[in-house]
Image (cartoon, rainbow, N blue to C red):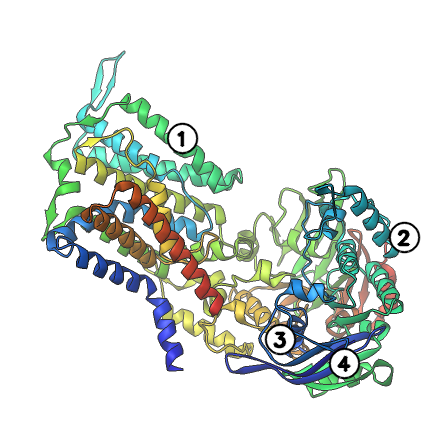
Amino acid sequence: MLVVENISKHFSGVAALDNINLEIHAGEVTAIVGENGAGKSTLMKILSGVYADYEGRVLLRGKLVTFSSPKHAQECGIAIIHQELNLIPYLSITENIFLGRELTAWGGLDKKAMRLKTLELLKRLKLNLDPDTLVVDLKVGQQQVVEIAKALLTESEVIIMDEPTSAISDNEVKVLFEIINDLRKENKAVVYISHKLDELFKIADRYVVLRDGKLIESGRMKDVQTNDIIRKMVGREVRLVRNRSSKAQNCELLEVEKLYLKNPERSGEYLLNDISFCLNKGEILGVFGLMGAGRTELLEAIFGQHPKYTSGAIRIGGKEYTYSSSIEAIKAGLALVPEDRKKDGLVLGLDVQKNIAITTLKEREVLGLLHMGMETELCEKYRSDLNIKSSSSKQTAGSLSGGNQQKIVIAKWLATHPKILLLDEPTRGIDINAKNEIYKLMLDLTGQGLGIIMVSSELPEILAVSDRVMVLSEGNVTAQIAIEEATEENILKAAIPKSI
Amino acid sequence: MNLKLYKTYFIKFQSLIALFVICLLISLLSDKFLTVSNGWNVMRQISVNVCISVGMTLIVLTAGIDLSVGSVLALCGAITAGLLSDGIGIMPVDLYIGFTLLGAILVGLFCGTFIGGFNGWVITRFNVPPFVATLAMLTIARGLTLLYTEGHPISGLGENFAYIGTGWLLGVPVPVWISALVVVAAVIITNKTRLGRYIYAIGGNESASRLSGINIGRVKIIVYAIAGGLAAIGGLMVTSRLDSAQPNAGVSYELDSIAAVVIGGASLSGGKGTILGTVLGAIIIGVLNNGLVLLNVSPFWQQVVKGMVILLAVIIDKSNAKSR
């Protein structure tokens, strides 16, 4: 279907892709795996027409193609569904699907025909919704289906999905996989990019491993196992050794008692319901929950982001804490590494140093002016402590890889010498090496007496790192499990809402 | 490699190069341009715009905008002029308060700062978009100016006051001294202080800044207050130079200052830009205005040329950003 021959792409002298050869077959799902910076997104950008200048050839159905623009690639039958969806929130499903290719009749829009076609597409994708629904009212998973419908409308033969499951619940993943299976039956070629290896084993037929811009190996999914692929991605085996000891709980560090969070959008409903728990010094509390369980909201409420809607008591080190603002939270010794580091964690346009320094500027004020020497010192300390890879401390944060960006966010919080670290999906979208560095760092920090609350939607991560697991479901604590007794099964069981 | 280095230098100094080219062209066409007296003349003319634009830059860096500076300039100039010439009379009790020069100036500056701070308060407290909040203030302040002046210029302000706009100190016009001080202070604020760092951080990513413990509301109020204060300084300079407060002073000054900010390379979406860039932008606009007058270009064409320069500056900026 789609053949890539000797593709190379250089960015200012550095090879992002080095002589890649691969074939993508119709009626199969091809998984592309690799660490961040391995060249996955560069390859996808070439295939979808974002980059027009590269070495090598792309053949579609045996014919040489050079895409001049994403639109051109789409017309040739290649559709890409990005991690960040490209839909217009205040237009309806129909209007979004037909955007840029509206049907016309008598010089006006043929709304009836478009609506019918949309209905048909939605039916095919088993999305039982009115085509006139506004996209803003859809769940993320449903929006993804709308994107797929868009691809089907243009009769795309190749559908590329970039991390499609990163923001959707397990149920929605199931639906998505059913759709992908249908696409496979319709003889479409699906290219699937994901960090979640266990997913790939459920859905993919073939795999392609990229590392440092080179194609390391490709083959059939059924011939390999997770560990084989991981080894090829990183070139070495990774394992986390953790000596755990669950101590008696004494609430010396943090005590949360009867915490409620009202839903600001719907009065009478609660996002968090009667949450009570403790955190000890040197302990990692893993918080697991499905989408919508209230994981992020819990951390935000503790960090003083919803003071108007929060009620309940929080004590830090035995002292009452009023959760009224982030300023208050930082004073109390809290630090929050947010889920979306680009949106909430970093100022991408500022350099590494300024990002790290931002939380502690006050400490380096001399006669009202910032002491640059001290700031550089601070930055260099964390750059080497956390192994942040940047060409210099003056490199802009936005130009770094996800793992390094995450380390900067952590560094800026460590600079405040927190007592409690709140980590929201600390390893989302970062490569395995950086993941392991962050796990190791977390263990080091607990060794120094810090308490960590880690929210994660990945069970293996929860089980590997936590001392204790707290499970949230629809805003309630449904289980608190000591790590010795925790298994994937009993955690998941507690996480699944009872209403389903 | 060398070529690339040249290119980055070119990009870095492109506004300087543009200014140089403009100066060269004008001086070839007019022998009055490159003279000392004309040089000071241009500098004096742009000092008002420089003051306002410095404040505008701080606001634009936070991803905001201030459309009210022209009206605030007029109002503060009028208030100072009114206090100087008439003081405050409270009729029913037959009380009259006279003002010294310094007193009148301070009240004018306070009014500007207060109005700016009020803008910031409205924007942060009620989450009103800066464009709308300051658009409203543009009308309010202009209306207050007309009310206060009853639509007539206030003149006869005395020689001492005229010194601010027309005097010389150590061979340099006083307005140039004032604007230079403002620029130096702003450069220090943006590069060397916590406030400056917060301004860039908020413009770059407001939600990350909030989570980092920055008091967004306070920073914004301070920034808008500074801009209001600088508009008031501009108002003093204008009023002093004309020796009268005109009710329609400063009309469309906000546009000139936004133009200077944009030509100076700042991004209206915040987080990117420098004070010195803006100063260069203001100088380019000033030199263009001056040169076009010297060349006897009709004022209508001057506007067209100015607009085209703004467009050109932004287009070059965008294409540089792309090629990087």
Pointer 3 residue = A441
Q: Give A368 or B293, whichever is nearer the viewer.
A: B293
Q: Position of residue A118 (x, y in %)?
A: 81, 50
Chain ID at mark 1: B
Would residue B286 be visible to someone looking at this image?
yes
Would residue B193 be visible to someone looking at this image?
no
Q: Position of residue B40 (x, y in %)?
A: 15, 51
Find out whether the residues at labels 4 and 3 contact each other: C-beta distance under 8 Å: no
Q: Using residue A227 as the reference point, say whether residue B163 is left or right of it.
A: left
Pointer 2 residue = A500
The quadrant holding residue A161 is: bottom right
Gap in angstroms between the C-alphas marked 2 and 1: 57 Å
Q: Residues within 10 Å of mark 4 (few under 14, many from 20)?
A: some
A311 vs B161: above or below: below
Q: Residues within 10 Å of mark 1 (few under 14, many from 20)?
A: some
Mark nearest the camera among 2 and 1 is 1
> Residue A121 bears which disc, if any?
none
Gap in angstroms between the C-alphas marked 1 and 4: 65 Å
Pointer 4 residue = A23
The quadrant holding residue A484 is: bottom right
Q: Amino acid at mark 2?
A: Ile
The N terminus of chain A lies in quadrant? bottom right
Q: Amino acid at mark 1?
A: Thr
